């Protein structure tokens, strides 16, 4: 697996693979649990939290770019996002939490700003699907950007399982923000380049 794992299954910063998996799993379980708690609050308050969705091209709505990614329009909407977010987020977080956080922030901002700029007037957009599409795009290209064969294989596996997501970037369904999907995907691909891993010189390299 290149320079990511050493022979004793310990990462270069001293963290074991099992510990990273546990941390990534707890992080994503907590994130998804938070989304369900927020939807419960939204339901109990008569959808009061929906006001934090993104209304396009209104300057005051720029502050809602981040919270909109944590809210949903109902339980069915939330359920459809929960499993792919949990799976893709877990895989992405295995590479390290700092990089994962930077990737997610980039995706949320690119997706949210894209919606703010291009969504139809008089609409409110919210949901984690922009993050889902972003993580999909990130995992799809990360291995090629980092030149890491193991991550390329992961990307292929993600493409096989979730490749049908790509249809979501097309304006084919009423009431679905293809803009959020498209810009989320673009944000994930951009994050793969922005936060690429520097290649370490081989230990036996000799310079003169």
Image (spheres, rainbow, N blue to C red):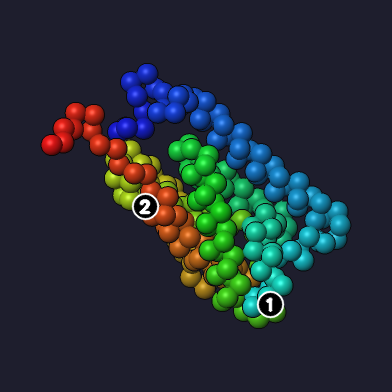
Q: Residue furthest left?
A: 208
Badge number at residue 141: 2
Badge number at residue 193: none
Viewer-nearest of discs 2 and 1: 1
Q: Quadrant of residue 83?
A: top right
Residue for point 51% across, 30% down: 21
| Nearer to me, 102 or 166 | 102
Which quadrant is home to the N terminus?
A: top left
Badge number at residue 58: 1
- Whether residue 77 is visible to the viewer of this picture, yes or no, is no
Q: Residue furthest front?
A: 208
Q: Residue furthest top?
A: 8
Q: Quadrant of residue 175?
A: bottom right
Check the image and report above or below for 21 versus 187.
above
Distance from disc 2 to disc 1, alpha carbons, whole Å, reads 33 Å
Give residue 114's position: percent from left, percent from top.
Answer: 55, 70
Seen in the image, is 46 located left or right of residue 114? right
Residue for point 52% across, 25% down: 19
Residue for point 42% across, 50% down: 195
Could you tell which of marks 2 and 1 lies nearer the N-terminus? Answer: 1
Residue contact at pointers 2 and 1, CB within 8 angstroms: no
Number of callouts in the render? Answer: 2
- Whether residue 117 is visible to the viewer of this picture, yes or no, is yes
Residue for point 65% across, 59% down: 66
Does dot 2 land on a helix, a strand or a loop?
helix
Does dot 1 land on a helix, a strand or a loop?
loop
Q: Residue furthest right?
A: 45
């Amino acid at each position: 697996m290149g320079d990511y794992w050493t022979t004793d299954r310990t990462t270069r910063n001293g963290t074991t693979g099992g510990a990273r998996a546990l941390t990534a799993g707890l992080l994503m379980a907590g994130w998804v649990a938070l989304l369900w708690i927020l939807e419960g609050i939204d339901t109990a308050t008569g959808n009061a939290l929906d006001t934090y969705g993104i209304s396009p091209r209104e300057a005051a709505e720029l502050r809602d770019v981040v919270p909109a990614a944590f809210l949903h329009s109902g339980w069915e909407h939330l359920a459809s996002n929960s499993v792919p977010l949990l799976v893709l987020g877990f895989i992405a977080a295995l590479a390290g939490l700092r990089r994962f956080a930077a990737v997610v922030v980039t995706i949320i901002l690119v997706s949210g700003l894209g919606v703010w700029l291009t969504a139809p007037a008089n609409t409110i957009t919210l949901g984690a699907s922009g993050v889902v599409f972003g993580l999909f795009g990130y995992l799809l290209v990360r291995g090629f950007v980092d030149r890491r064969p193991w991550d390329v294989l992961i990307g292929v596996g993600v493409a096989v399982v979730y490749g049908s997501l790509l249809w979501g970037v097309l304006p084919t369904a009423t009431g679905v923000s293809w803009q959020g999907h498209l810009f989320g995907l673009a944000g994930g691909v951009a994050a793969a380049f922005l936060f690429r891993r520097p290649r370490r010189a081989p230990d036996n390299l000799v310079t003169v």
